Amino acid sequence: MNLYDATVPIFTKLLTSADTWFDKAAAVADAKKFDLDILAASRLAPDQYALVSQIQSACDQAKFAVAKLAGKEAPSHPDTEKTVAELRQRIQTVIAYVATFKREDFVGAEDRPCSHAWMAGKSMRGGDYLDHVALPNFYFHITTAYAILRHNGVPLGKSDFIADIPFLP
Amino acid sequence: MNLYDATVPIFTKLLTSADTWFDKAAAVADAKKFDLDILAASRLAPDQYALVSQIQSACDQAKFAVAKLAGKEAPSHPDTEKTVAELRQRIQTVIAYVATFKREDFVGAEDRPCSHAWMAGKSMRGGDYLDHVALPNFYFHITTAYAILRHNGVPLGKSDFIADIPFLP
């Protein structure tokens, strides 16, 4: 067992799925004659992150998960995006970054101490960081992004979220 | 590394969190004088699962994940719930079931072939089943449940979702 399997292909697949949601969103905006970027500023409650921040947060969770588990320094991606086009670029940037990681980068990752600025000097066992922080936060933000689009009439279904799954031959 | 850590404490913590969301939901219903069970039938889009189905689905994903990874037969939990009180009971039933699993039940789980009725005779490697099916679906449904409550004015924040995280001493 190697944490590569629980991170690189998963983040890549889900972020790739999220990118395709914007094709469907663009089709709805086109058909209904509204500005696609209105969706980027949409949210489900007034005191909730808008779609743009949900995508930025999902991207950061993926980026930091692979970097910290592999003991590398993650690149900085300032949260400057305002448009759907910029969000899609952010997604592609993170997919490309995640693709630089190899299986061997994750040898021993489950026991590697992982720390973040918000941990205020504390650290977590790598496996716990993945299970208790990175995955729940990643899924929280990417599912909320999906829900915001869904709520605004974008025709998404579960298969747009889960995508292909690897069966045994 | 043992898949116990990625399943039992995680499902238990998130389902316990979800149960507490209903305390906050009940307080809102009480203050605004509406029937709490209206929330059980709420959804973010007309062709989306209502809250009741989101919770049932999250419960089933947790139940099936631990059962199949451990090579056991999961109990049947018919989707009969209609009220918040019944949903909370379903959550407690699954938390109690998950608590019957021990670390040793998951030895070799990552390579155990896991199958489901919907797989139509196919099966998946246990680790892939967890990473590609059980976790994404569990988080998808529990986050959507959270989003439905959030959209309806229940004052939830990220800490109500993530709850306690285990730092190194």
Image (tube, coloured by chain):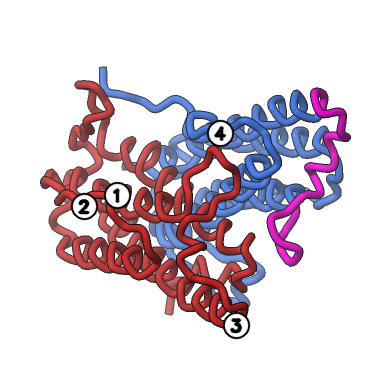
Chain colours: A red, B blue
Res. A77 mark: 2
**Residue position for label 4:** B12
**Residue position for label 3:** A31
**Residue A126 image-quadrant placement:** top left
For marks 1 and 2, the one nearer the N-term is 1
Residue A76 sits above or below residue B124 on the image: above
Q: Are marks 1 and 2 in contact (CB under 8 Å)?
A: yes
Please, what is the three-letter code of the amino acid marked with disc 1? Asp
**Label 2 SS:** loop
On what subunit does the disc labeled 1 rest? Answer: A
Q: Where is residue B147? Give x, y as percent.
A: 61, 46
What predominant SS class does the magenta segment belong to? loop
Q: Is residue A96 left or right of residue A161?
A: left
For marks 2 and 3, the one nearer the N-term is 3
The magenta stretch spans which residues?
B30-50
Picture residue at 54% right of the left edge, 38% below the top: A47
Q: CA distance from mark 1 to mark 2?
A: 8 Å
Q: Are marks 4 and 1 in contact (CB under 8 Å)?
A: no
Q: Nearer the viewer, residue B43 or B117?
A: B43
**Label 1 SS:** helix
Disc 3: CA contacts within 10 A as few (<14), some (14-19) or many (>=20): few
Q: CA distance from mark 4 to mark 1?
A: 26 Å
Picture residue at 67% right of the left edge, 53% below the top: B57
Q: Is residue B38 magenta?
A: yes
